[in-house]
Amino acid sequence: MMGMNAGVAGDGHAGCVGACASGEAPERPWLSILVPVYNVRPFVEACLASIIAQMAGQAGVELVIVDDCSTDGSADLCRHILDDCDIDSRLLLHEGNRGIGVTRNTLLEAARGDYLWFVDSDDMLLPGAIAGLRDVVLAHEPDVVLCDYVREKGRPFATFCGRSGVESGVPMQCTETLIAGTFARRRLHAWSKVWRRDLFGDAIRFPEGARFEDVATVPWLLLGAKSFVYIAQPWIYYRTRKTSIMAQLNCRGRFDRCGNDELAVALQGFSRALAQRLPEARSRVDSAVAEFWAREFVKIVKRLARSGGVGMQGKGWSAFQAEARRYRELMEASSPQSFEAVMRAYLRKGRIVRGGALALSLAVAMPRRISVNAELSPEA
């Protein structure tokens, strides 16, 4: 499941046919904008319009779209949009539905740019995003560029906890800071980051047939990065869909066991690789990763509670406990710190609400008395 080993080997275009290309591409582009499409007809036109409007004044940018065998006419709409514009673009079609992981891998293999920006087809690029990115790349050539985003009501969301990385005129060159700051903000999506293509190499691909492909892949890309720039301004307009993965996962009254299982194993192997890559700079990174993972565990237990268990109404409290315990064992095995250690750290820092929520989830998952030796102070 982990991003380092998951994905396709060989030709990423297998099962894919080219649909159309527009514009001439005599030189290697500096940026590839990569858009996966599947049954998003109500959203994709605005997404592509937000990209194409900015490409008109930017040399060296290509747009690559892969349609994953949509059934709602999304591919035809994309073809019509590209036919009407003069930009460096390609539309590729999967011959069968392969899933988001394979679709992103197809995009990755098709891309020619030095930098890769995965833009979800239900989101939009905000005005000035490509120009702003170009300025950063020309000035600093970082491995990763992180940006913020806004949601429908205009509320901004930060994707990184820390300095922007350009105050001194050079990009930040600290993998520990990059990983800790990203996990602290809990924004492990691929689309809020622009990646130097070399980070993927031959080994890192998105996992096939699994949801939460970002959680399984982004940490490995961060681990391989040596420099980054964080732009503390929104470049992405994030739109929600009722049919999105997260919307389905959080559906009240229904527990998606398969989806939650895929999340629970998404970080397999990462803490071990982290210890090998950063043996002398672990405390802050370990805490950020463990807190992120513990909060995901709490959310799974809450979903279990809201749904009455995994379709096991009538099976009783013991069945609910057993399922929560199973998730604890799965997830704690991938955490650099035990969840009880995370809980005690929360309480020492006065973060009573989070510490209490984790303590309750642990009590459900492991029905024994939890020892807490910590001074309790008001939540910061």
Image (cartoon, rainbow, N blue to C red):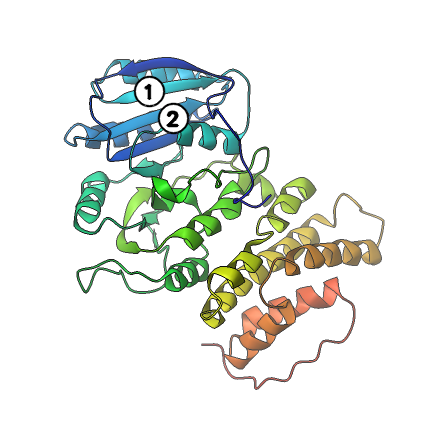
The residue wearing badge 1 is 90
Q: Residues within 10 Å of mark 2 (few under 14, many from 20)?
A: some
Residue 169's disc is none
Q: Is residue 292 above or below residue 100?
A: below
Toward the viewer: 332 or 313? 332
What residue occupies the far left of the structure in this picture? 57
Q: Residues within 10 Å of mark 1 (few under 14, many from 20)?
A: many
Secondary structure found at label 2: helix
Toward the viewer: 22 or 321? 22
The residue wearing badge 2 is 110
Query: At which x and y percent is residue 250?
Result: 59, 45
Secondary structure found at label 1: strand
Give the distance between the C-alpha atoms of the residues marked 1 and 2, in whole angstroms. Answer: 9 Å
The reply to whether the C-beta atoms of the residues labelled 1 and 2 are less than 8 Å apart is yes
In the displayed structure image, the side of residue 359 where residue 119 appears, left or right: left
Q: Give residue 369's quadrant in the image.
A: bottom right
- The residue that appears at 69% across and 43% down in the rendered structure is 257
- Decide which of tag 1 and tag 2 comes sooner along the chain: 1
Query: At which x and y percent is residue 198?
Result: 36, 42
Rendered-image quadrant of the C terminus: bottom left
Query: At which x and y percent is residue 145?
Result: 30, 49
Q: Is residue 235 above or below residue 338?
A: above
Q: Give residue 301's quadrant in the image.
A: bottom right
Query: At which x and y percent is residue 261?
Result: 66, 46
What amino acid is found at the position of numbered circle 1 in the picture? Arg
Q: Would residue 254 be seen by someone viewing this image from the given angle?
A: no
Q: Is residue 29 above or below residue 217?
A: above
In the displayed structure image, the side of residue 361 where residue 283 appears, left or right: left
In the displayed structure image, the side of residue 109 where residue 267 appears, left or right: right
